[in-house]
């Protein structure tokens, strides 16, 4: 089983089931055993649902036996998966990484599945459990008050990135076939880069975020994380679709490229394509998280933008230049030009300010997915006796060192300030993005998924405890275009480098085809060698 299941793909697993070599129960038990062996060191899986996973496996085995030769399997039948701990799974606690949702007697037990969870179940996936994440997904590393620290599978001392670090460590370690991540500023893509896996950020609105505890619902997205592009695309085909729980998905079927997305996976998909390298990323011009509020003074806005600067490390620049040779080998052209999204683009994006609407997302989530005790911010306070943190209800959290001034919380749909706060600068930024593609006849953009290698978390970085690797990629969330990270090679110390590609809105099929072609010509991924004892007790 170790030989057959290590690095197994969905198509390979289907063959094993079709040939009756293994039952679903056999496969699920193998993954449970592997998690039990290594999770104490890497701490990727926060909640292993042994009972639920084995019950699902037994049911699927029974249905297959009863169906005989006429039995029809779903696209993810018998595929063991994990889900990020902010994604509602009926009957399990949605910790969102935070100890406050684990208070005995007040746990946030999900009353129903998130939209994508229901879709994955219907397709036959077996949910093994929930992956660790930082509190509210609000960090570039993976420390959680609910469960501690997740380590990088390639070296447990190093960061796997955040906030989907639990999922990427689980998937690259073969704790599951695939999982989901969420991404508000880089949180699928940057962690995928640290761990030699594929991370998909779909066009915002292609996949519903209904039932996922929000950090900032105007920027949040969810997508699959897998070891191969094919597996990620199979999952995306299942996850995509309109959902009344997420208004941004309305009309997506008409705007998106027709599925299934697997039909775009061609080894020659990069031939003749042209990609530009964004100048502002090479120059380290970052974007403040959640943007700059219009009410800020010019001096404070400038300070925020300056503080968001994340220079590109020399070793990352070298890894990037090596990685794009794979694009060229597959027949693509890569263009470097200072006019491709210069620093002025980052400044335009920075004025997409979503900070005023955070509380509305939390209120909507609790109303639909809160436990019986609380379905609003006020009801949580009454039931538990303490406030929810400012991170998810707005305001300033002085304990976290956040000195940005208080922003009044509003409802988005009826707020006359929504246009100047969000929609106008968002349109300007998207127009600038599309103009660069049109002017230089580019199919998409290519750039490093992080500005630096994963840092060592056993020692201070720049004079303080590591807060993870950082990226200059939150602009993708601000304008909602699709992006994907693929394994792009390794640094000299053996830690992975990830290459990110972006495309025009709703061209997800093309984008995934490029990722597949790159994967097929480079074959950069190699699995980590896990240890049973680590330098950090329980990887905390």
Image (tube, rainbow, N blue to C red):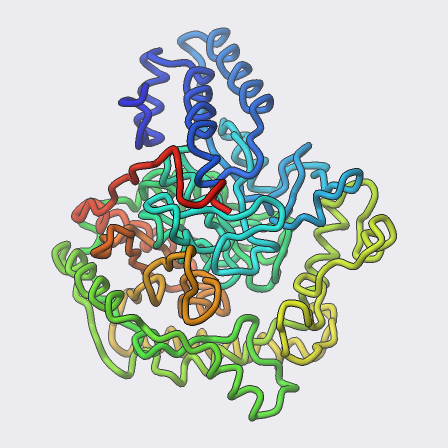
Whole-percent x, y for residue 55 in the image: 58, 18
- Front-lying residue, 155 or 35: 155
In the rendered image, is residue 403 in sight? yes
Residue at image position (50%, 42%) is: 239
Say which residue appears at 83% left-offset and 43% top-offset: 373
Quarter in which the N terminus is drawn: top left
Question: Against 510, is 441 above or below?
Answer: below
In the displayed structure, does residue 115 sit left or right of residue 313? Answer: right
Query: Residue at point 29% right, 70% down?
Result: 313
How many discs mark residues in the rendered view?
Answer: 0
Judge by depth and name the residue closer to the eye, 43 or 190. Answer: 43
Question: Residue at the location (70% across, 43% down)?
Answer: 102
- Residue 394, image x and y in percent? 70, 68
Q: Residue furthest right?
A: 382
Does residue 175 appear to the left or right of 405 in the view shown? Answer: left
The picture places residue 344, in percent across and down from the top left corner, at 40, 85
| 28 lies above or below 83 | above
Q: Is residue 253 visible?
A: no
In the rendered image, residue 437, in percent from the top left (x then y), is placed at 31, 73
């Amino acid at each position: 089983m170790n030989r057959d299941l290590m690095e197994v793909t969905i198509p390979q697993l289907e063959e094993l089931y079709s040939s009756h070599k293994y039952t679903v129960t056999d496969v699920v038990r193998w993954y449970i055993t592997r998690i039990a062996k290594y999770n104490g060191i890497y701490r990727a899986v926060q909640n292993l649902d042994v009972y639920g996973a084995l019950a699902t496996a037994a049911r699927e085995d029974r249905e297959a036996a009863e169906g005989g030769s006429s039995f029809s399997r779903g696209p993810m039948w018998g595929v063991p998966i994990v889900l990020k701990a902010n994604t509602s799974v009926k009957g399990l606690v949605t910790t969102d990484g935070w100890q406050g949702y684990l208070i005995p007697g007040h746990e946030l037990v999900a009353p129903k599945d998130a939209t994508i969870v229901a879709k994955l179940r219907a397709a036959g996936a077996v949910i093994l459990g929930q992956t660790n994440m930082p509190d509210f997904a609000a960090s570039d590393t993976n420390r959680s008050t609910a469960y501690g620290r997740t380590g990088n599978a390639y070296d447990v001392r190093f960061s796997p990135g955040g906030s989907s670090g639990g999922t990427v460590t689980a998937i690259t370690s073969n704790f599951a076939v695939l999982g989901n991540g969420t991404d508000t500023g880089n949180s699928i893509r940057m962690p995928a880069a640290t761990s030699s896996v594929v991370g998909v950020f779909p066009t915002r609105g292609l996949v519903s975020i209904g039932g996922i505890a929000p950090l900032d619902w105007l920027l949040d997205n969810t997508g699959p994380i897998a070891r191969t592009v094919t597996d990620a695309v199979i999952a995306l085909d299942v996850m995509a679709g309109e959902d009344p729980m997420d208004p941004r998905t309305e009309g997506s079927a008409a705007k998106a490229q027709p599925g299934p997305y697997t039909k775009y996976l061609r080894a020659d998909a990069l031939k003749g394509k042209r990609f530009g390298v964004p100048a502002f990323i090479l120059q380290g011009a970052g974007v403040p998280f959640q943007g700059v509020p219009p009410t800020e003074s010019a001096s404070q806005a400038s300070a925020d933008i300056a503080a968001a600067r994340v220079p590109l490390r020399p070793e990352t620049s070298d890894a990037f230049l090596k990685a794009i040779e794979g694009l060229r080998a597959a027949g693509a052209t890569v263009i470097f030009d200072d006019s491709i999204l210069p620093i002025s683009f980052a400044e335009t994006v920075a004025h997409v300010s979503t900070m005023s609407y955070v509380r509305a997302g939390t209120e909507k989530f609790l109303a639909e997915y809160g436990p019986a005790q609380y379905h609003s911010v006020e009801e949580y306070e009454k039931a538990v006796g303490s406030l929810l943190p400012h991170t998810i209800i707005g305001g300033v959290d002085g304990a976290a060192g956040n000195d940005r001034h208080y922003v009044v919380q509003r409802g988005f749909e009826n707020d006359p300030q929504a246009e100047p706060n969000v929609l106008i600068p968002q349109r300007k930024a998207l127009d600038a993005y599309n103009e660069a593609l049109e002017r230089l006849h580019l199919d998409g953009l290519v750039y490093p998924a992080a500005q630096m290698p994963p840092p060592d978390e056993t020692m201070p970085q720049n004079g303080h405890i590591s807060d993870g690797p950082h990226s200059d990629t939150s602009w993708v969330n601000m304008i909602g275009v699709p992006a994907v990270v693929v394994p792009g090679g390794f640094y000299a110390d053996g830690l992975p480098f990830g290459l990110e590609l972006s495309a025009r809105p709703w061209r997800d099929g093309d984008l995934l085809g490029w990722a597949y072609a790159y994967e097929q010509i480079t074959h950069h991924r190699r699995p980590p060698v896990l240890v049973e004892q680590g330098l950090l007790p329980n990887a905390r």
